[in-house]
Image (cartoon, rainbow, N blue to C red):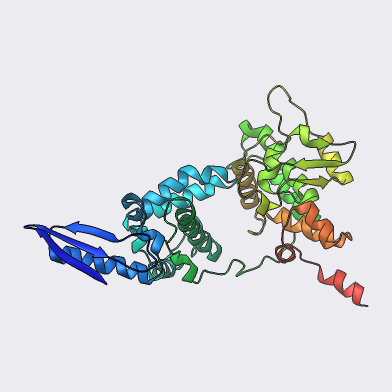
Amino acid sequence: MATITKRGKHQWQAKIRRKGLPRALTGTFATEKEAAAWATEVEAQLNKGQHTLVFASKEASKMTLAEALKKYLTQKTPLKQSWRNEQTMIRMWQRDALASKALTALDSGDFAQWRDARLKTVSNRTGKPVALATVRKELNIISQVFNTARTEWKLKGLPNPLAEVKKPPAWAKPRKERFKDPQLRERLFEAMQQQNKFTNQSNQAKRFYAIKAMQFALETGMRRGELCKLLWSHVHLKECYLEVDRPEHENARLKGGDREVLLSKAAIVILKSLPKNPQTDQRVFPIAPSTLTKAVRESRRAAGLPEYINVHITRHEATSAFRERGLSMEETAEMTGHTSFDTMRRYTHPERSATLKKLR
């Protein structure tokens, strides 16, 4: 129970004593009403078990979501491989009305209301409602900010309101398409060679490497970022394997960490067809991930190919092909870097005809 006493003509002190607290909590205010309001707020936090939050510094306890996002963007985002995408999401959140509120003032209802409104938003790029997976990622980044504030920024008693918010499913529309048809592949690669909105005459080298990267991805199942960062020093043609090195990102373990990818005969042929330019670039595919994405997207549109054809479909196709070739789940995971068999199953799409053949 709080006690409020008058200390002077314009000075009121509120004091809270509780069993288990390391010391009494006190605050001095100009009016009795302000003292009572402070005592009510602090006792409410104590009743919720937020003891550490009460004893946090004044600056930390008043941190707004905008301030937390700025701090997270500086300290944590650069350590992630997908930092560009996360930077875009954080900047979107910094413009949101919720960003002006203190972390301690935000609750699950705020974010549930935000989620419902966001799901009704139409994407400027696609003209369609924002994808469920996108909204899930946008909510997840706020959850990570709250967790970091609690564990690293002296707000250990801060609850994470996202823990009580139902997020959109990650796999609402699982991909089932394959990129196995040789004619589809040929049409895409031909379009990537030709001049269109993205692949103009001045980008001949980029077109060449984009095609080779896609072909190599179909043989290895490597991620887009892994392809564009692969170094010649990590390629061992005689031993038929390459090293995927992911040491610089704090979430590397979640992506399978460092691993070795075995090379098929077709993969080796692709590597041998590439020029080596040790003086200018040590990378096997010297293009940016965004360049590869744009090359495939614009070429797909120019050729009138289905929308499901993108860079990431190569990972689905390669995972499915590994299983069809007879690789076990463990062997496939070693190749692809999947840390969960449940996730890997979402990348595996066996053909109906092949399954029926085994049943007969």
- Which of the pair 339/317 is nearer the observer? 339
Q: Can residue 200 be seen in this view?
A: yes
Outermost residue toward the top in this view:
279
Left or right of 28? Residue 147 is right
- Which of the pair 342/292 is nearer the observer? 342
Query: Residue drawn 56% across and 43% down?
Result: 79
- Which of the pair 266/260 is nearer the observer? 260
Query: Residue drawn 53% across and 59% down?
Result: 137
For residue 222, above or below residue 356? above
Left or right of 272? Residue 306 is left
Query: Residue drawn 43% across and 46% down?
Result: 71
Outermost residue toward the bottom in this view:
360
Query: Residue drawn 82% across and 72% down?
Result: 352
Q: Can residue 310 be seen in this view?
A: no
Left or right of 23? Residue 171 is right
Residue 115 horizontal/vertical position (percent)? 44, 67
Residue 40 horizontal/vertical position (percent)? 26, 69
Residue 174 horizontal/vertical position (percent)? 66, 67
